[in-house]
Amino acid sequence: MSQTKLYIFLFFIVFGLTNQAQTTDELDIGELEISLQQQLDQAKLLTTRGDYYNAKDNLEKALDISIKINDRKSEGVIYTKIAKLQYLIEEPEQAISSLTKAISIQRNINDKTNLGLTYNIRGVIHSNLKQYKTALEYYSNALNSFEDESSEKYEAEVNLNEARVYNKLGQPEKAHEKLERAIIIANKYELNRVLSSSYILNANVYQSKEEYNLALDQAQTGLDIAQENNSTENLNNAYLTLSKIYQSKKQYKSANLYLNKHIQLSDSLLNIQRENLSTEKSTQHIVDYQNAENQQLKDQITEADVGSNLARITTILSISLITILSLLTLSLYKNNNIRLRTNNMLQIKNDELIVAKEKAELASKTKANFLSTVTHELRTPLYAVTGLTNLLLDEEPKEKQIPHLKSLKFSGDYLLTFINDILQINKIEANKVELDPEDFNLKTKIENVIAALNNSAKDNNTKIHFDYEENLPETYIGDQLKISQILINLLGNAIKFTKDGDIWVRVKKAEVKKNLYRLNFEIQDNGIGISKEKQEQMFESFSQGSIQINRKYGGTGLGLSIVKGLIKILEGKIYLKSQLGKGTSFFFELPLKHVEPKKKAVVKESKHIENIKALDLESIKILVVEDNKINQMITKKILTKMGLGCDIVDNGEEAVNMVKDTEYNVVLMDIHMPGISGLEATRRIRTFNKELTIFALTAVTLEDKMHEFDEAGFDDIISKPFKQETFEKKLYTALSGKSEATA
């Protein structure tokens, strides 16, 4: 009975102590919050002094307090701070682990700003580990997390860090773009450390581009800011950068002066770093920590011995043991729940990533299939529109009908241009655009483009002025077709948005190395201009100034995107300056190799239709395989005009049977048909007839489909809607057997 009473007595004591502890905890929350701030302040002070190990101790104590009072926001921030110190004391794996915990907490509580800061630190670590792609992804996530205006100031450092990565990757233009953004924000919020670093890095970028005067200016600005704000690290970087620039300029005395300053300051910083990060100090730190714990236990035991008797010690130890066991059980229970939640969360995130990847792959395939389908469905009726229009214009229409037919032809050509723009964007994005360099006269090329667009300018009462730098060579090697496309898009854009005004086209040299010229092109207008908010988006696909501008001026919003893609392929760069209501200037730079002009032999143009009529037409048999009745009629009329007859079938199975029974010279095969496709029909024909000429007469033009035509056995492809001369040339080549006709 007495033993039972003892157990009951102990139970009530433990219960009372627990209730008392809970009450005490509630009363002590305020004190714990004060203690948390004190630990954070002390950690900050020690970090500034370079005492990273003791600073880490303070942060770990602060972390315990934040967990105890369930301050999730502080908990996430502290994990990030701990990660920074772990990386400084060369523990990158532990740092990444701490950042992962911080990210998990900040996502759960939707702490966007601190999440962005954590992503930034994660990016820095991956960048220093030379994992540049991963680093850029985290920097992008960081910028996306800074949604509020109050977070804008943090974007400066992220842009600076992105610039560092692009500079290491050898992409100076992207680095320069990011640094300009960093400098603007750092100036706005007086972030002197970031501002100094940005100017110094910008100097490195200019040096890599061999623009040494600009590099010196930027480096000196960064050095001045570093000296004013006593930023030792930036001061050291500025000395090294200035030394390198002067070395490049062959001013060795100045280079040596700054190099000595850099070495002296580096030695000083290295000694401090060795002192703070040495193995001996790390080991001593751990030993001191353990000794302090042992001494604390000894003091507690000595205290317990003084003035105590055996019964009291037994009671205290029993209660302590029960309390410890209870707390240990509770702790294990909580840890187990946290572990389970973490594992579940990781599994969910992993599943989400897999689903996102699958969706991205599906979207990519869907886009390709969509473009293929839409292209075919649009170009097929366009074949009818342009074909019938050309036939009607050739059949001596009434004078009143000619303007209408020309308008119809213009509309068809506009739609075809729009479709081709979409295809061009797709090719650029898929890196499938190939260069076709040849000798050409640049000045003449620009004059021809201006002449072609001059009527449109006159319609807007706008005058085009052309200024080609004096003594600048005119003949170069380059892809003149792509250069024409760039000029047509930019000049056409200027004409569209300029009424009763002027447009200037200027060309001058930026730099010359032997025969390699870097040429500056400028297209300036005094039209409606572009707002600052819209300027950054102007080179994106389907981007225009506004809905009102789209309705008033028309256009697809693809032209500038194509221009930027083509200039990038030609290894150039482009930017714009504009002011609303005052006009716009587009500047682009291209590298072109100068060559001496060659005398071109005068080539008499071959009239293929006359050549075809000179053949033995009665013996020629052509099979047209086309399911669209209108297209059947158009193709037949075109062949009849050439003096050629043809048989027509509307499906692949019948085409195979006709070729088996009749000896044809040429087959014009459509691709998309009911039953078997043109590809399958051609494959079947090739099993018994290898010599027959088979042309794919199709609206499919995506380059990633072209290998299918070769594998099926087609001799060539004629894309609908086609140019009459192209069709005649290929047909004459096939019928005459003269390969030079295709040249």
Image (tube, grey):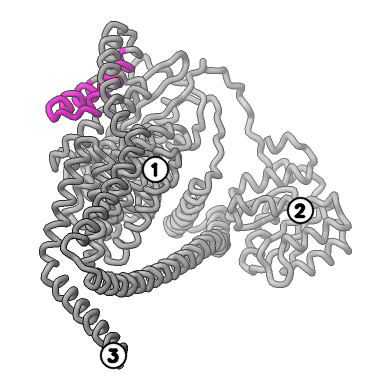
Element type at mark 2? strand
Residue denoted by label 3: 2
Classified by dominant secondary structure, the portion drawn in magenta counts as helix
Q: Position of residue 666 (x, y in %)?
A: 78, 53
Disc 1 and disc 2: Cα gap in Å? 67 Å
The answer to which image quadrant residue 491 occupies is top left
Residue denoted by label 1: 91
As rendered, which of 264 and 219 lies closer to the eye? 264
How many marks on residues? 3
70 versus 232 height, above or below: below
Q: Is residue 447 left or right of residue 532?
A: right
User: At x 29% / y 42%, what residue is drawn?
Assistant: 288
Q: What is the quadrant of the C terminus in the image?
A: top right
What span is colored magenta in the figure? 217-246
User: At x 79% / y 42%, what residue is drawn?
Assistant: 736
Amino acid on which disc 3 is placed: Ser
Which of label 3 and label 2 is nearer to you?
A: 3
Marks 3 and 2 in Cβ contact (< 8 Å): no
Element type at mark 1? loop
> Is tag 3's residue or tag 2's residue first in the polypeptide sequence?
3
Disc 1 and disc 3: Cα gap in Å? 58 Å
Q: Position of residue 369 (x, y in %)?
A: 56, 62
Q: What is the quadrant of the N terminus in the image?
A: bottom left
In magenta stretch: residue 69: no
Amino acid on which disc 2 is placed: Ile
Disc 3 and disc 2: Cα gap in Å? 109 Å
Q: Is residue 586 left or right of residue 394?
A: left
- Mark 3, other Cα within 10 Å: few <14 / some 14–19 / many ≥20: few
Q: Position of residue 123 (x, y in %)?
A: 36, 45
Amino acid on which disc 1 is placed: Glu
